[in-house]
Image (tube, helix red, strand yellow):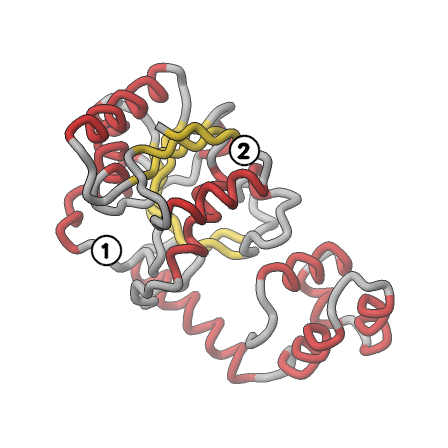
Amino acid sequence: MKGVGPVTQNALLDSCSCINNCFEACYDDLVSLYTAKLIGKKKISSFIEQRQDMDIRNRAEEILEVSRTLGIDVVTREDVAFPVRFKNISDIPVVLYMKGSLMINEYESSAGIVGARRCTKEGKGKAIELATSAVSHGSAVISGMAKGIDSYAHTAAIKSGGYTIAVLGNGVDICYPKEHDRLYEEIARCGCVLSEYPPGTMPREYNFPRRNRLIAALSDTLYVVDAGRHSGTETTIESSRRYGRQVIVV
């Protein structure tokens, strides 16, 4: 729904207790959420106007059908597998798409490892060392499958027999960058490829800052390796601090 993003979606679900109630609630009950200043007036109006739109419902059914066809699992906020680390964060999506096994809730600790695409030899070594150490201590390794530091962290986690999650800025049916097709398959086999974007969503520059907040939310500790100022990792650091995660810059 246009104008009804994650913050509004979470607020509606929190207020109405379940998705059915959101769609069945009367006009006055929904307007009362605005009166209580839980949700903005424009957001409530957008939801009320669009909740009976059959085009939107048909699009949702199409997404589910495509996901089933492509072997993509759809995980909602109500599912047991939905990351506990996402709880009580208002801007986290209520629906996730994935390939592999979403087992993050089975891990008491998680390490996010992100950094420069064009990293130094020392940076590469540090990423491998951090990921290997995280696995040896029973932690999940979280990153974004980008070139450089991200790919070294995922690869080291897999080689160490650990669990790793790659959070994408596109649909999980698309491998980006293309040259990581083998790594993509390995992560889906040994861990999880995860996205808030439905299948078919192409990688766009503005998708990645949003992707970075999910990396931050999944990571108890975020390690930033070889990243320069004004790089994409800044948004991950900002989100980590906003969510109360530990940040270590290497």
Is residue 81 visible to the viewer in this orientation of the structure?
A: no
> Which quarter of the figure is the N terminus placed in?
bottom right
Total labels drawn:
2
Query: Can you tell which of label 1 and label 2 is closer to the viewer?
Result: 2
Query: How many C-alpha atoms fall within 10 Å of the one at disc 2: few (<14), some, or many (≥20)?
Result: some
> x, y percentage for residue 69?
32, 63
Q: Examine the rendered structure and indicate whether residue 49 appears above or below residue 199.
A: below
Which sits in the foreground, 109 or 75?
A: 109
- Mark number for residue 84? none
Q: Examine the rendered structure and indicate whether residue 120 appears above or below residue 135.
A: below
* Residue highlighted by disc 2: 245
Q: Amino acid at mark 1?
A: Tyr
The residue located at (59%, 84%) in the rendering is 53
Is residue 53 visible to the viewer in this orientation of the structure?
A: yes
> x, y percentage for residue 132?
28, 20
Which sits in the foreground, 195 or 237?
A: 237
Q: Examine the rendered structure and indicate whether residue 70 appears above or below residue 135.
A: below
Q: Disc 1 to disc 2, how far (Cα)?
A: 27 Å
> x, y percentage for residue 221?
47, 29
| Quarter of the view holding residue 118 | top left
The residue located at (71%, 62%) in the rendering is 12
Which sits in the foreground, 160 or 244?
A: 244
User: Mark 1 vs mark 2: which is more N-terminal?
Assistant: 1
* Residue highlighted by disc 1: 176
The residue located at (34%, 60%) in the rendering is 171
Identify the element where label 1 is drawn: loop
Identify the element where label 2 is drawn: loop
Q: Examine the rendered structure and indicate whether residue 10 appears above or below residue 116.
A: below
